[in-house]
Amino acid sequence: MSDLIDTPPLKPRMPLRARLIFVALFFGSAIYFGVQGDYVLAAALSITGMASFSGYRMGAASILGTLVAIGVAIALAPSIGRAHEFRFEEWFGTTGLTNRILTIGTIGILISMAVTTVWFIVTRLILLSRPRVDSMNRWVGFAIGGLEGAVAVMLFLGGMLILEPIERDRAEKRAAIDAEGPAVSDWILGISDGIYRSKLGPTIIANNPFKKIPQLNKVAEVQQSVQVLSDPEKIDELIQHPSIRKLQQRPEMRRAVDRLNGDPSIQEVLRSGRPMDRAAVMTLMNHPAVLELIDQPDFLEEAYKVIQQTSNEQSSGQQSSGQQPVNQQPVIRYSTF
């Protein structure tokens, strides 16, 4: 252990010739395509290059250690966090869902830090006396880092293409009433148009992970949930839905609903008729009965079914009246290749 403390830290240095080759390959190419106006490909090359060099500095062992630490935190933090919620409530005065998020998040970070530290000490002791193994570790890390960067770019750009028809539909509706849209909407549309013009565009379109792996594409589901959860009246309708009322036959479920119905602050939020703002969200998140409701078996599953059913009924009504649902808006492409 004394070697670990007394020995200077390992300073991985990529051979100069290799460094120049990869700098030219990634960043030289990025500059070239940036000058040509293909900013999407330039940014993709730059991000992949930075991820590769970062992977070389970390090494495959450290990358693997980070993944293990995250996995352990995800596996253990929820159960440990729920067991210690009362302590955080005593220490910080937080309640309800807010307290649970704080507890699980804090414990997850602590677990991740502890696992990462132990992993670092063990791998450092192994690699200190094995320079060849460490060199291999660095180059494998370089490859893994580059792969992670490429996947991140693919997910980001693919996500922009999934969001584009929704944002374009909103932009057309705002244009009809001469209203100014949020900057993020223009940002999404600008990136999407850049993808269609980029030399990387056909590859992204043909291999969009959100279309290749349908399970990743939860945009429609999230949009439906946000529409319900941002409208207090719809939240009240959700609680009063027949399938949710069936669950209320359980004493625990009935008790949670009665607590919500009997709390003036909750009723003010649900029956105010105003859109959900930050204060209203915090009122719901801090209420212990909301957390108790979420913990009820089958509640979230049934609530999700109700949201989908309501959305499908609204979509059917739009189609019968000649309107087209937002999530089926055709993609408008500006391809120049």
Image (spheres, helix red, strand yellow):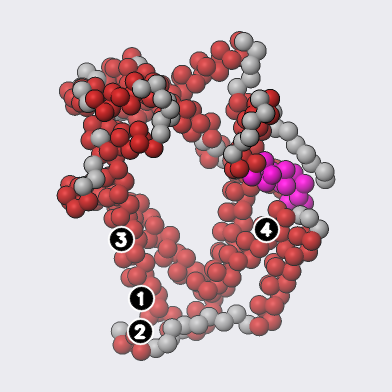
Contact, CB < 8 Å: mark 2 with mark 4?
no
Query: Which residue is under mark 3?
Result: 110
Across and down, in percent, residue 153 comes to 61, 53
Residue 3 magenta-highlighted: no
Region rendered in magenta: 187-200
Residue 190 magenta-highlighted: yes
Query: Which residue is under mark 4?
Result: 43
Label 2, secondary structure: give it. helix
Q: Nearer the viewer, residue 135 or 298?
A: 298
Across and down, in percent, residue 16 comes to 66, 83
Is residue 84 visible in this depiction of the protein? no
Q: CA distance from mark 2 to mark 4?
A: 39 Å
Judged by depth in the image, the label closer to the viewer, 1 or 3, is 3
Query: Which residue is under mark 2?
Result: 4
Is residue 234 visible in this depiction of the protein? yes
Judged by depth in the image, the label closer to the viewer, 3 or 2, is 3
Decide if residue 74 is on the left or right side of residue 331: left
Query: Which residue is under mark 1?
Result: 121
